[in-house]
Structures are given as structure tokens and as C-alpha cells.
Amino acid sequence: MLGRKYLLIIFTLPAFAFGYLTASNVSSIYAGEKCDAVLDLDKSIDKNKATVKNNSASCDHEVTLALYDSPQNKDTFGWIEAQIFLGSDTKIVKSGETVNFFVEDIGVTCLRQADLFKGREIKIPPIYVNNLETAVYDVPCATPTIINTPTPTNTPTPTQTPTPGPTSTPTPEPTATPTPGESISQVVLASTGNISFIYAIILAGAISLVAGMILRKASK
């Protein structure tokens, strides 16, 4: 009897363990299918904006919108690898909620790619295995702003007005002041000349008088 009980236990335990593990796996599979972002979420992307609605009654989902600038044209060789990350917006979308996402567009080329995915891990380049939706769209190309630089006008050079220089005032030369000796000599000479002239007149008068007397006598 005891041997049969041991045999029963030996055969029952493995069967019990197998059943437990199988039930756990099945429950986990159903739980995973129940919280499926692809099935639970209604999503839409409008350029750099997105809207996500969670239709699940019990599951919350973390969702991210990431925006990329694409220097190359779509579907050309290496265009995914060449994309430049611009920014992202991550939010928790709770059951029954509708959440809006927005990423500022600061790109400089004419093409963008927006990726909406479950989780928050950013991929560069944008190769996502948990991607929910992707949008590739054109934007107006940025045109350089031309600044008209005014042509400089030729400013006439001011003429230099000659500054009148100081006029040279002639310095009066000192007049020679005669010394007292020179003055006396000049006076003496002047007096001597006058006396000689007087004497000459007197002499001429005397001669004339004598000549007149002689002529008078001769006439008698």
C-alpha cells in the first residue's frame, strides 16, 4: 500500500507542475494580448502633431512622438540614416483618455518624418520595432532672407578753409639819434655856410659900389 502511494505521488507531482506552468503561460499570453497598444490605441499623425485615444478599459500605455529632419529625398539610398533628430514628446495615455502630442518643428530642409511609437527610447536613425505609426511629409523650404544693404552715398569731402596766419607787423627800425657832438658839428657847419653867403653878398655889393664910383668919375 505504501509503495503505491509513493508511486502515485511521483507520477502526480510532475503532472501538477506541468499544469501549473501551462496555466501561467496561458494567463500571461492572454494578459499580454489584453494590453496591446496596437489594438488598444486609435492614433493619427498630422505633421508634427499627433492624437492618441486609449480604448482599453484597464491598460495604460506610454507613447512617444519623435520628429526628424530629412536632408535627402524619400526612399533614396541612405535617407533614413541621414535623418536628423529634432525633438520628441512622451506622455502616458491612460485607459479611456485621448492625449495630444506636439513637437516643435525646427528643421531646415524640405522633408520631415514623424514616428509615433510605444515607449520612450529614441532611435537615431529612426528604426523602431515598436512603431505605431509613421508620417513622412513635405514642408515649405526655407528661403534665405535677402537683406538689401543700402548703397553708401559719397559724402563730399569738406574743403579746408585756410586759417589766416598771423600778419607780420613790420618792426620799426630804430632811428639813428644823433649824438650831441654830431648835432653841434652840423649846427656849426650850417652857421659857417650862412656867414660865408652873407660875406659873399657884402663883397659883391662892395665891388658893385666901387665899380659904380669908378664909372661915375670916369664919366665926368
Image (tube, rainbow, N blue to C red):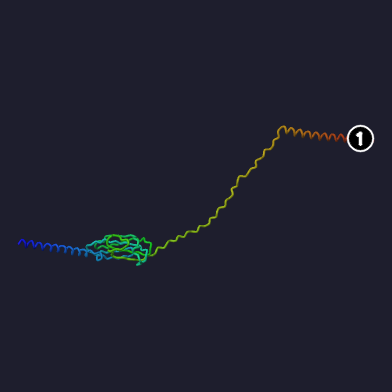
Q: Is residue 130 left or right of residue 149?
A: left
Residue 147 in the image, given as x and y percentages of width and height: 45, 60
Q: Quadrant of residue 110?
A: bottom left
| Residue with the mark numbered 1 | 214
Which quadrant is the N terminus positioned in?
A: bottom left
Q: Quick check: 135 above or below 160?
A: below
Q: Examine the rendered structure and indicate whether residue 181 appears above or below residue 94.
A: above
- Residue positioned most to the bottom: 75
- Residue 150 place in picture, x, y as percent: 48, 59
Q: Is residue 14 left or right of residue 205?
A: left
* Frontmost residue, 194 versus 90: 90
On the image, the x and y values in percent for residue 40 come to 24, 65
Image quadrant in which you'd find residue 13:
bottom left
Q: Position of residue 71 (x, y in %)?
A: 37, 63
Under mark 1, the amino acid is: Ile
Quarter occupied by the C terminus: top right
Determine the secondary structure under disc 1.
helix
